[in-house]
Amino acid sequence: MFELGSSLREARLRRDLDFPAAEQATKIRAKYLRALEEESFDSLPAETYVKGFLRAYADYLGLDGQLYVDEYNSRYTPADEVLERRVRTRQPRAPKERTRRTRRLETNVVMVALVGIGVLTTLVFMAWKFGGGEGDASLPLQRSPVARPAGGLVIRAATGNSWLVVRRGSETGKLLYQGTLEKGQTLRFPSGRVWLNIGSPELVAMRLNGRPVVVGGARPRSLIVTADDIYPAGPDS
């Protein structure tokens, strides 16, 4: 057991963050973030909001959001409700197992088809090489196209977890991604203008059209990414 509010406050202070910065990054009102740190859960609209805000805020601070939700459930949720939730969580395992078996079967079918195509290609090549006349030898060889580096934006959590928000065009554009990018996880976005908010830039590596881009800094940053460049986002971006 651990103190939910004090651990959130300590994590925020370690990052030298104030409530306005956390509100901008998480899109959760500052008074609700303060209520989480004070464990004044009755100040939040409903229990569903408490758990959602608690998970999002903990993830943003580089903590394990699910661990905080589980701790909240163990202390504030009735035991009967927790048991019922666990039973509902365990029930879908059988369909998932059937889904995995179906996927394995589909994979095997694809592998057999690929082997068959390979064998047929080999037979055709052997027949052309050893059974054709001189006229066949003059046929041009087909060359496989050279693979080119994929364009677009690549974001990777290189050395730790980081909160990340990605929107198309600007801060008010269509939401493309929001959540915690875990260490080692990589996201790819096609070429085009996007708006980014990165909670821990020092933990993130980025590449634009195959070219590494250094973000840097230990505080949350908002950036604009175009087809050719990355630059800080202004107040009207």
Image (cartoon, grey):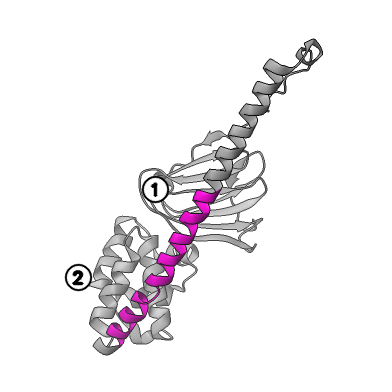
| Res 146 seen here | no
Which quarter of the rendered picture does the C terminus lie within?
bottom right
Query: Compared with residue 164, is residue 68 higher up or lower down, i.e. above or below?
Result: below
Count how many numbered circles sit on residues in the image: 2
Q: Which amino acid does label 1 sit on?
A: Ala
User: Residue at 38% of width from left, 79% of height from top?
Assistant: 50
| Res 43 seen here | yes
User: Residue at 59% of width from left, 34% of height from top?
Assistant: 118
- Please give the label number shown on residue 2: 2
- Please give the label number shown on residue 218: 1
* Residue 179 position within the rendered picture, expressed as x and y whole percent measured from the top left: 46, 61
Between 226 and 52, the one nearer to me in the picture = 52
Q: Is residue 87 magenta?
A: yes
* Residue 107 position within the rendered picture, expressed as x and y whole percent measured from the top left: 50, 51
* Residue 17 position within the rendered picture, expressed as x and y whole percent measured from the top left: 38, 59
Magenta region, residue range: 81-109
Precedes in sequence: disc 1 or disc 2:
2
Tag 1–tag 2 contact (CB < 8 Å): no
Q: Is residue 12 left or right of residue 45?
A: left
